Image: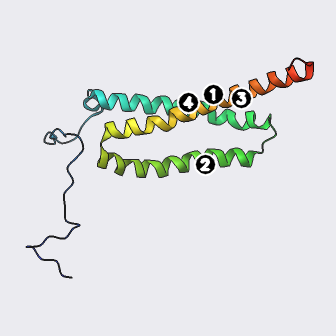
Amino acid sequence: MEHSPERPSPLDHERLPAEPVAPEPAPRGRVGVIELLRDRPFRAVVFGTFVIMLGYGILSPILPLYARSFGVGYGAVGLLASAFAFTRLLFDLVSGSLTRRFGERAMVTAMRAPVGDFRDWSEIASWAGEITAAVTADVAAGRA
């Protein structure tokens, strides 16, 4: 099937952005660090990334020693650190295209749900351990 200008292909369409985009100012040559830091959303992203990487930078040197106290080998700790980096690389690539397609606000809203669910299930799991221990103690004491 040939493509003709009179009859556009179903793949020839232009998707409008999910959120209105302000026009970019004309480039004035080099942009300095001070000019970048004047932009409030940019500062928020830089600060958030800094805090996350600071936490990872503090944790990563201590993690092998902490894991050794549980009997975990250095290879498993290295695999964990590599898995974090590899997963971040993959999701950064995918999330960029998803953000462009659905918009920043929709993606932030959608990604908060799994993080909240993980936190909730972690908390429920810790309660389950405490409840199991309490019931076991009651059964052992003959109170249940």
Locate residue 109, reporting x and y percent: 38, 35
Q: Which circle's residue, 4 or 1, is located before the other in the chain?
A: 4
- Asked if residue 69 is positioned above or below residue 86 in the image, the reply reads above
- Asked if residue 140 is positioned above or below residue 36 in the image, the reply reads above
SS state under label 1: helix
Residue 135 or residue 66, whichever sits in front: 135
Residue 142 or residue 89, whichever sits in front: 142
Locate residue 65, reporting x and y percent: 74, 35
SS state under label 3: helix
- Please tell me whether mark 3 or mark 1 is closer to you in this view: 3
- Asked if residue 73 is positioned above or below residue 7 in the image, the reply reads above
Q: Which circle's residue, 3 or 1, is located before the other in the chain?
A: 1
User: For mark 2, what is the residue?
Assistant: 82
Q: Are marks 4 and 1 in contact (CB under 8 Å)?
A: no
Under mark 2, the amino acid is Ser
Under mark 4, the amino acid is Gly
Label 2 crowd (10 A; few <14 / some 14-19 / many >=20): few
User: For mark 4, what is the residue?
Assistant: 55
- Please tell me whether mark 4 or mark 1 is closer to you in this view: 1
Q: Which circle's residue, 3 or 2, is located before the other in the chain?
A: 2
User: For mark 1, what is the residue?
Assistant: 123
**Whole-Å distance between the Cαs marked 4 and 1?**
21 Å
Residue 9 or residue 57, whichever sits in front: 9
Locate residue 118, reporting x and y percent: 57, 35
Locate residue 8, reporting x and y percent: 14, 70
Label 3 crowd (10 A; few <14 / some 14-19 / many >=20): few
**Whole-Å distance between the Cαs marked 3 and 2?**
31 Å
Q: Residue at x 71, y 29 (%)?
A: 128
